Amino acid sequence: MLKYIKDQLEGELFIDKLTTALYATDASVYRKIPMAVAYPKNEDDIKKLILFANENKIGLIPRTAGTSLAGQCVGDGIVVDVSKHFTGILSLDKEKKQVTVQPGVIRDELNQYLAPYGLFFGPNTSTSNRCMIGGMVGNNSSGTTSIQYGVTRDKVVAMTTFLSDGSKVQFGTLSQNEFLGKMSLENFEGDIYRNIHKELINKEVREEILTEFPKPQIHRRNTGYAVDELLKSGVFGDGEEELNLCKLLSGSEGTLAFTTEIVLQLDDLPPKLSAMVVTHYKTLEDCLSDVAPVMGHNLHTCEMMDKVILDCTKNNRTQLENRFFVDGDPAALLMLEVKSDTEEDLELQLKQLLNTVELSGLSYAHPILKNDDINKAVELRKAGLGLLGNIVGDRKAVACIEDTAVALEDLKDFIGEFSQIMKGYNQEAVYYAHAGAGELHLRPILNLKKSADVALFRAITTDVAKLTKKYKGSFSGEHGDGIVRAEFIPLMIGDKNYELLKRVKSYFDPQNIFNPGKIVNAYPMDESLRYEIDRKEPEIKTLMDFSDSQGILKAAEKCNGSGDCRKTHHMSGAMCPSYHATKNEKDTTRGRANALREFLTTSDKSNKFDNKELKEVFDLCLSCKACSSECPSNVDVATLKAEFLYQYQEENGYPIRAKLFAYNTALNKMGSKMAGFTNAIYDSKLVGGLIKKSVGVAPKRSLPKVYKVDFDALLNTAKEKSTITKTKVVLYIDEFTQFLDVELGKDAIEVLTRLGYDVELFYAESGRTFISKGFLKQAKNIAIKNIEKLMEFSVKGLPVLGLEPSAILTFRDEYKRFGIDSGRMEAIAKNAYLIEEFLAKEIKEGVLTADAFTTEKRTVKIHNHCHQKSVSNQKVTFDILNLPKNYSVSIINSGCCGMAGSFGYEKEHYEVSMQVGELKLFPAVRKTTEEVIISANGTSCRHQIYDGTKRKALHPISILKQALVV
């Protein structure tokens, strides 16, 4: 049956174990293994899937980014993922300020496209750098900007859809006469209009809707189908609005029709000047008391974060830097943003807002942020959802009551009663989100692996639903009903209205093929959970130490599905380069974590790592480590991959090529003894080509040359020519510098000695090649061997300076995972520096000045190693290259270069490697003139830049050597 439809599609359809496992979850607590996953290529494919689903009574679950929190895009039918092929911005009408898009267009990328026209799409979710317009329409998303720009439903002008009979229909604004014309159609579309008219023309039905639905001033209202919105039209009431069934389709979660095009109403770009006041509070009550007064101002943002969220930011490398404005240890804070086109008006608004804050006297601190500091604060707030995954262990902040919205005047009382409910359950909830819109994302902390907490899951949700109904609020403000809240729709809007929704569903979808189990005839909210209840936890033994996550399984389970790894290369950051190239879910951090969780949990093999599906899902991971810092939940897939490779290869053997790469240092050492002969062989088209072919190296790659250099002699000569005026340092000659990038080692010795440092050399293999190939026993032995000397340097207070980031940073990262004395490893880690880090520190302390360097004008563009971006920071490189007075330095927004050590050499990975380079780095390098210096501190990066652009990049130390005048 599935083979038939697979053969009919121009796109793809998968039924394999890995793909169905990847699509069994979203960002919710639910797990349903789908029958198949389809990637339709065009509208014909959509129609074929609908007709097939009708014929076989199979559900179709529409999906874009899969970041839904309520389980909207999980189900046991066919998941239809439109995020890969339906990604076009089809047209822009500048006069009407309207844009037509396909559902797979990412919100932030749409706004990048619109910005040159002075326009933007207002609704702004925390997932805006990867969420897609189709999902936003399905959920009626709103986000931080709703207090100014409304919700998605307000912006949808028209929708092109396929109905459940396979007919293609466009919904849009209709006058009364046009509506009557639609009712006269003798087809399925006409049936829908006639049935909607039949229902809503009934005065009793309309009165029941107005009586039971949430208060109309709550604009974040998504409970069930928005039949109340249709009553605002002249067709069914005294309203002046024209009728548009897009109001009904928005927020319908794909249960009524399948959308392929959406026309959106745009707004002018907001005022360019911004300022944000961040008010700090000692109690949650004080914070909530200030919401109503500050909302009397023309705020563009009024967001709240509580202590639980703020504490999570302390454990995330990226967000730790973004919490610079947090003063002390607040119980909660409000982020209040004002905007204007003039400085004078902005300052006036600020003054008036601060007067209100100071008049209340509840805030103990209220710093003012401007420019990029606002963006950092907003990123901190946006990371809130993912950061909740940082809670170690099985107790997590669970999405179930996180979408309640009440009228602003009811907010404080509602929260007061909510807090009493939580106390009754002995719960400390998490409070964050859109205070200015009367919506707080309230989450209980539960362990849904235990039946007692699953019972609490239902009980708490039920009690909060009743409380929300008491205040005539919306139980689904912006995250939708999905599975978790659909059961409660009858309570929220009354049984009569719920029966109306069931009839509406039947008019659009009589066979129930569109996303069944959502909104009406709902799945139970406490079944089909991600984890088996009261299961015996699998015991997974590992070589690396994952105790910081309570084991490798829980390290994978930290992924909550928020999908930060699905942002594309158009956004900042490097995560996740393989997904940037392929756009496949399996190549995301989320996909890898989900697959590992799935197979470690469900595999019946004694070695649960021994699954070909895991080999496939980790295959394109470049081990860039971007996820370890950019993922809000700190899911470190590079480390998970290293452990997987070790376990898998222990069971299945270590391939010859993996051994050659892992033992590359030993081979280079041997080759360096006859460097000229070795390099001649490597350069030979015949012999070098045979070597590459026999071991599976890409033919287009050049094999790196090996060298033999007496660095000790060089150092002695350099010392004789220089005068020691500064501290003693240890220069780490790693395996790459010793045999491959020897000129870099020479440059580093010259720079340090000429600057007056007393230099000692430390030769050692870092173990990087073994770690990347899963030879963890060998890597651990190297670490043990290195520890004594590294500890000696630490005790003496001699900083160890490294040139190659992937080598020196193992001392700060992977060495800690080998279960060696943690106290000693911490001391070693604190004493290990990128040479850029050390020099930047010396500059900051006034030890190094520009006097030692040229005053010539040069332009430098920086591409930094991924491990530096993850474990350290890029600014240190920027700072040291800015030391020469007339050097103009900038950092390329380059992401990952794509080489990733041996990855880019492997013939089956070469194409993806080059695709990654072509996304950002290669074009940026090609745009520069030959006079521009390209800086790259990674040996792989320099090689990749040369292979991709024929430009020679230099390590920052080599650039400083050229600039030295002392």
Image: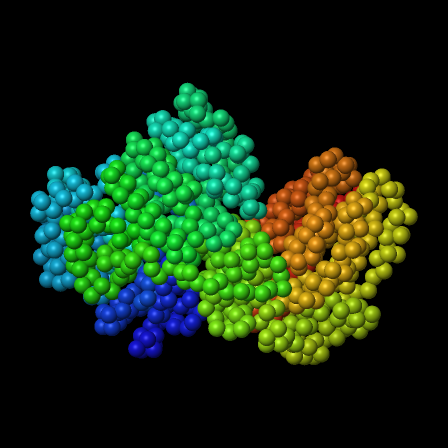
The C terminus, quarter of image: top right
Q: From the top left corner, tell me how far across and down residue 6 is, in percent.
A: 34, 74
- The answer to which image quadrant residue 430 occupies is top left
Q: From the top left corner, tell me how far across and down residue 856 is, in percent.
A: 73, 41
Residue sitting at 32 percent across and 49 percent down? 459
Residue sitting at 34 percent across and 40 percent down? 421
Horizontal arrangement in the rendering, residue 247 relative to residue 303 (left or right): left
Residue 917 in view in this figure: no
Residue sitting nearer the eye, 216 or 958: 216
The N terminus, quarter of image: bottom left
Image vertical order of residue 595 relative to residue 347, above or below: below
Image vertical order of residue 478 relative to residue 352, above or below: below
Q: How has the structure been colored for display?
A: rainbow
Residue 707 in view in this figure: yes
Residue sitting at 78 percent across and 55 percent down? 788
Image vertical order of residue 111 relative to residue 845, above or below: below
Image vertical order of residue 104 relative to residue 662, above or below: above
Q: From the top left corner, tell me how far across and down residue 50 is, in percent.
A: 26, 67
Q: From the top left corner, tell me how far across and down residue 959 is, in percent.
A: 72, 49
Horizontal arrangement in the rendering, residue 495 relative to residue 101 (left or right): left
Residue sitting at 79 percent across and 58 percent down? 763
- Give the number of marks: 0
Horizontal arrangement in the rendering, residue 900 relative to residue 414 (left or right): right
Residue sitting nearer the eye, 652 or 487: 487
Residue sitting nearer the eye, 38 or 884: 38
